[in-house]
Amino acid sequence: MSGIRGTILATVLIVLAAIHIADAVSIPIIHAFQRYEELIIVYPHGYDIQRLKDFGCSIERVFARLDMALVVCPTTVRGAIEKLGVEVTPNFNVSIDVTVNSFRLYKSVKQIDIGEQRVPLAWSWAASRVGADIVWRYLGVTGYGATIAILDTGIDPTHPLLAHKLRGWIEFDRKGRPVCSSPRDTYGHGTWVASIAAGGDTSMYIFGVAPYANIIVALVLPGGYGTAAQVLAGLEWSLEPYDCKGDRLGVKPDVVSMSFGATANYSNVFLQAIAKLIENGITPVAAIGNSGPHTTSNPGNIWGVIGVGATDFDNDIAWFSSYEDVEWPEPPFTWPFGGGYQKMYRKPDVVSPGVDVPGAFPGELLAIGSGTSASTPIVAGIAAMVSRILISKGFSGAKLVEEVYSIITSTATPIDAPGSGYGLVNAFKAVSKALDRAINTVEVRVEPSTVTLLDEMNIYVKGIIEGMEITVYIAGSEIYRGIYRSGKSIVVKVPPTHIGGNEVIVIDRGGMYYGESLVWVSPSIFIAPRNTTIGGFVNVVVSGLGIADMIAIYIESNILTLDIANLRGSYLGRLAPPYLYPGTYTVILEDFTTPRIRLFTTIDIVDGRKENVTQIINRTEVYNYTNIVKQYIALPITINAKQHYVFNTIDYIDVATAYPNITIAGIELKSVHNNRISY
């Protein structure tokens, strides 16, 4: 009996000892059918992350430069792990917040007629709106020598707008582990944003803000969706880029552009990475989100990241652009930007164009899309140009990032509206300030403020010295160059351009005097000549459309064309009206992309011939396609050939005969000469 008691007592003591040990190290019991979760761990420097294996966790990816790791743990151990002095966050999802389904695909960039035109048709209104083209022309700064890191869905490096610009590539899986692969775009979004930052050139293809900058790309959002671990991997990679085998690329970015975010997320998971970027002199730029007011997206809402909102043609805040006063739940004790992490601050920091912005799309195509995804690479391109100038002046580290931020925000044009931050970015003013070039502000006033194609508008300028040579631009197009005369307006005609606000810029020859204003363009249609003969051609010019809008032009119920407006929001075509009897007809333009646009004009059609042509054919078979069935003797056939049908192949023709049971399968009319038909 005593032996049995001793055995029981020993067993109890062993069990109690086991329970005591488990309590001491806080290791919960793992069940056979335990569920698991992916967790991001932020640990103190020098911490042994391998300790988490004692809790049944597997270490999937260590971000050594960030003191972070991705682990997979039983769902029951999170509380115990948090007691070890580490921060724990689920490996949440991150998305681009803009689907390519909302993109409108345009033609191949190679199909755009470049020619010898003074006004490029391969053009983005967004690049001109922020003054990037003015920077190239007057300051000679194009992004040369700068490098922009794009964290996105990938890139099509063969696209004509991006060819020879890619200097580094990496792909990460959902756990942030490198994958060996060739550069590609898994969704199209990455190619689009990369071209908005650095696509094209400075003369014929006006798309990117910093067109001669280099690009490095991390694929972290396959198909438009990724995880926090993938984004962390991309951010850590940006500190010192390497290939999938771990070999260093020997290139360092000046800016990291992030057109994605986690909406209404205020976790600290990206803080370590952002702090490292700032400490290493790399400016982080991120989208603020497309969910409207009273929310923002992480990482764009982090203090020290340039969070970017969106504007439209009228310089109004886009309806989808997010903004709010951010109250960060757990600010870090130390922070390398702005004297420490602020508890409360306003986001976004700045805004830039984000509505109907054209850019590259895989397969040599162009795409027009909207979102803060487009606004972000615009600011990234400006930041890259400013950063390279400051580096040449000796700036580095956090001081460099702070100065880039200060220059971009202080030179932005204020907008009196919620969600505008410091205002609309201005590349010309920002780069000028980085170069220590003082800009004299010029007051510009346009009358009338609303115009249509070929209207005369008066531009009044104040603040320029008498006798200076000045140039006037509207939507990036030069419309006047001459000597400034005080007290006199500059009278110009409105060229074909897009609907809504168009920016008018006045600048002197040396780029020291600068002013801007908006003029609003309404839709209009012109036809020349207004009188045309049956079968004649007319020239159609339409202005005030949206960027690449789909349109149809009718005469009464007859469609003249179904086409797409160009990237300047205008349409120029040479059209042939269908056969109509002489008279006055209404010409109608329908805009399917912007339904509120519906235009009307008239055209007079006259008959240029005095009479119809009649020819009698006495044979059983007419050349090529006309056959007379069930008749074996010669028959007279009357053909009335109206002037309209004097084209190559004829679709319809009036045929008359007095004999029944005759079938005319078809006829091809070659030409009409002196009232005779040639076959």
Image (spheres, helix red, strand yellow):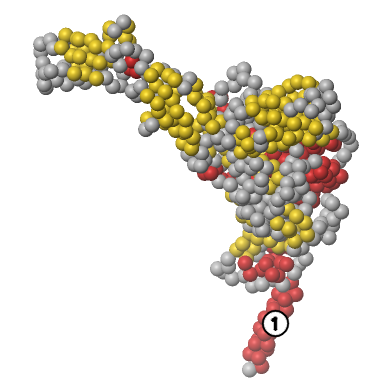
Name the side, left or right, on which 631 lies relative to 426. left
- Secondary structure of the residue carrying numbered label 1: helix
Nearer to me, 291 or 400: 291
- Residue at the extreme top: 674
Measured along the vertical axis of the image, is residue 279 above or below residue 562?
A: below
**Amino acid tagged 1:** Leu
The quarter of the picture where the N terminus appears is bottom right
Percent across and percent down for residue 97 are 60, 49
Q: How many numbered discs sit on the rendered protein?
A: 1
Nearer to me, 210 or 637: 637
Nearer to me, 636 or 447: 447
Name the side, left or right, on which 665 lies relative to 119. left
Mark 1: few/some/many CA within 10 Å (<14, 14-19, 20+): few
- Residue at the extreme bottom: 1
Tell me what residue is drawn at x 17 percent, y 21 percent.
Answer: 663
Judging by the rendered image, the residue that carries numbered circle 1 is 16
Tell me what residue is drawn at x 34 percent, y 13 percent.
Answer: 609
Tell me what residue is drawn at x 71 percent, y 74 percent.
Answer: 22
Tell me what residue is drawn at x 69 percent, y 70 percent.
Answer: 79
User: Which quadrant would residue 156 be assigned to in this image?
Assistant: top right
- Residue at the extreme right: 394
Percent across and percent down for residue 284 are 75, 45
